[in-house]
Image (cartoon, grey):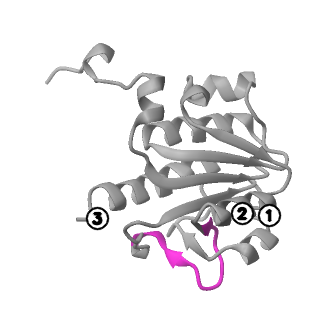
Amino acid sequence: MRKLKNEELGRLTVEEFHESEKTPIAIVLDNVRSANNVGSVFRSSDCLGAERILLCGITATPPNKDINKTALGATESVDWQYFTTTIEAIAQLRADGYTIISVEQAEGSIALQDFKPEDGKKYALIFGHEVNGVAQEVVNASDGCIEIPQVGTKHSFNISVSAGIVMWDVFAKTRYNAK
């Protein structure tokens, strides 16, 4: 077995990425305080073809050296917008036809493995602050919540890890299991 070289991977150019079919998800960051986490979400969003990222509240925005460090150029490929509040972002997403899903441990949440994206629907996935999670008012404004099952002593994953897990799951279910 031989490791492939970068030039053998068939990577899209930024222009090709903008024109490519996207996974029907928008990523919303609700007051994420670490620019490194923001950059990681940009990178995962690029890898999994997210339609766009909405950065809200105290969440850092490009250009930012800490975002750039982990995004590795994904701020150029993934479309993004900034909103003063996550509630404003949700209003825009609703107008654009998205179903709003907070990724949070909440009453009535759906375990990630049980979440079944509907064909033809677009989903906005909201990830929250590193300590406080998704704000309650944002959970209240959501159409539902997804929870990642966990068995350890900690009650949460890092936000960039959560985003990667949930985005991959929705990517796989919409790209590979939709048939």
Q: CA distance from mark 1 to mark 3?
A: 30 Å
Q: What span is in magenta?
A: 100-113
Residue ID at (74%, 57%) = 89
**Left or right: where 165 falls relative to 124:** left
Residue 108 lies in the magenta-colored region: yes
Where disc 2 sits, the SS reads helix
* Residue 10 place in picture, x, y as percent: 28, 23
Which quadrant holds the N terminus?
Answer: top left
Q: Nearer the viewer, residue 179 or 163?
A: 179
- Mark 3 touches mark 2? (CB < 8 Å): no
Residue corresponding to mark 3: 178
Q: Rate crowding at label 1 as few (under 14), some (14 to 19) or many (20 or more) other CA atoms within 10 Å.
A: some
Which quadrant holds the C terminus?
Answer: bottom left
Q: Quadrant of residue 48?
A: top left
Where disc 1 sits, the SS reads helix
Q: Tell me if residue 174 comes above or below residue 83 in the rendering.
A: below
Dot label at residue 87? 1
**Left or right: where 69 falls relative to 118:** right
Where disc 3 sits, the SS reads loop
- Mark 1 touches mark 3? (CB < 8 Å): no
Q: Of marks 1 and 3, which one's residue comes earlier in the chain?
A: 1
Q: Tell me if residue 16 comes above or below residue 160 in the rendering.
A: above
